[in-house]
């Protein structure tokens, strides 16, 4: 998948996803993805609504049980192994419910990303988005890229993205904004992971390989 234009969004499965209450699920990308626009992701380039922009009052969707093993390259502004940019979304009822925000969970990236400004899972996570139970085994920027999230709306006067139980492999990437570092051998042991992951019922563990997803085809 390739786009040489200087704008837009490129993803291994979906370029730009605005589907209210929709989702991207059980999807796997094994092909290389290249782009020089704004948003670049192994599965989705840009995901969700901006509540202050195009479609206020809409529920956002989620990305789950997806994997990327394709190489990602380019000079896009936001680059992630799963999604380049995640908008926060809007519940439409004035309440700050995390269940009504954009979410990326139970996904993994095993593909190399040839850009040190990238994130193993997400390039940029907007405030109130949810990023959890994701794993990165891909080499990000020769080990200098962020393991999980490259950047996001983090700060003392902002509603930080909700992130937990995310893991990345030591030497393949560095800390970035969030995530727990594991050695190569530890990343293959189920005991290294939080119960949020091991009891979710969506992951398969083996001491001979990194965890994979139970219901994601073509991994």
Image (spheres, rainbow, N blue to C red):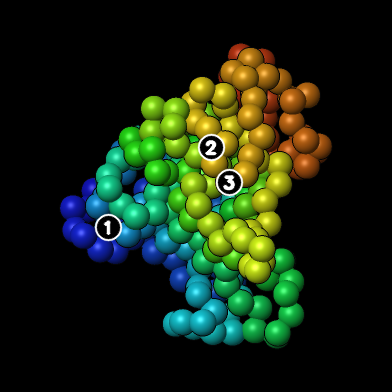
C-beta proximity under 8 Å, tags 1 and 2: no
Q: Which residue is mark 1?
A: 37
Give the class, few, some or many, for how many residues have Cα within 10 Å of label 3's Cα (few <14, many ≥20). some
Q: Residue furthest left?
A: 4
Q: Which residue is mark 3?
A: 177
Q: Is residue 173 above or below residue 178?
A: above
Q: Nearer the viewer, mark 2 or mark 3?
A: 3
Residue at horizontal 51 percent and vertical 82 percent from the top: 52
Query: Could you give the CA–CA distance between mark 1 and mark 3, rounded to whole angstroms?
Result: 23 Å
Mark 1 or mark 2, earlier in chain: 1
Mark 1 or mark 3, earlier in chain: 1
Where's residue 55, x and y in %?
A: 49, 83
Residue at horizontal 43 percent and vertical 53 percent from the top: 84
Mark 2 or mark 3, earlier in chain: 2
Q: Is residue 76 above or below residue 57?
A: above
Give the class, few, some or many, for how many residues have Cα within 10 Å of label 2's Cα (few <14, many ≥20). many
Residue at horizontal 45 percent and vertical 36 percent from the top: 145
Query: Could you give the CA–CA distance between mark 1 and mark 2, rounded to whole angstroms?
Result: 22 Å
Give the class, few, some or many, for how many residues have Cα within 10 Å of label 1's Cα (few <14, many ≥20). many
Where's residue 158, x and y in %?
A: 64, 67
**Residue 147: which disc?**
2
Where's residue 68, x and y in %?
A: 45, 39
Question: Would residue 156 appear left or right of 15 to someone viewing this image?
Answer: right
Q: Nearer the viewer, residue 196 or 184?
A: 184
Query: Could you give the CA–CA distance between mark 2 and mark 3, rounded to whole angstroms?
Result: 8 Å
Element assignment for label 1: loop
**Residue 162: which disc?**
none
Element assignment for label 3: loop
């Amino acid at each position: 998948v390739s786009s040489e234009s200087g704008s837009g969004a490129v993803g291994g499965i979906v370029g730009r996803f605005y589907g209210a209450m929709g989702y991207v699920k059980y999807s796997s990308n094994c092909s290389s993805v290249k782009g020089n626009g704004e948003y670049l992701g192994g599965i989705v380039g840009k995901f969700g609504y901006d509540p202050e922009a195009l479609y206020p009052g809409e529920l956002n969707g989620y990305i789950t049980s997806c994997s990327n093993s394709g190489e990602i390259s380019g000079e896009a502004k936001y680059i992630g192994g799963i999604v380049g940019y995640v908008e926060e979304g809007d519940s439409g009822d004035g309440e700050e419910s995390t269940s009504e925000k954009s979410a990326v969970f139970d996904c993994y990236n095993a593909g190399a990303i040839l850009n040190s400004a990238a994130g193993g899972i997400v390039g940029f996570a907007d405030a109130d988005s949810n990023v959890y139970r994701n794993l990165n085994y891909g080499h990000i920027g020769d080990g200098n890229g962020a393991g999980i999230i490259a950047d996001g709306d983090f700060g003392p006067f902002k509603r930080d993205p909700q992130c937990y139980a995310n893991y990345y492999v030591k030497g393949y990437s560095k800390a970035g904004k969030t995530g727990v570092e594991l050695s190569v051998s530890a990343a293959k042991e189920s005991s290294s992971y939080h119960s949020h992951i091991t009891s979710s019922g969506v992951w398969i563990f083996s001491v001979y390989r990194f965890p994979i997803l139970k219901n994601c085809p073509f991994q």
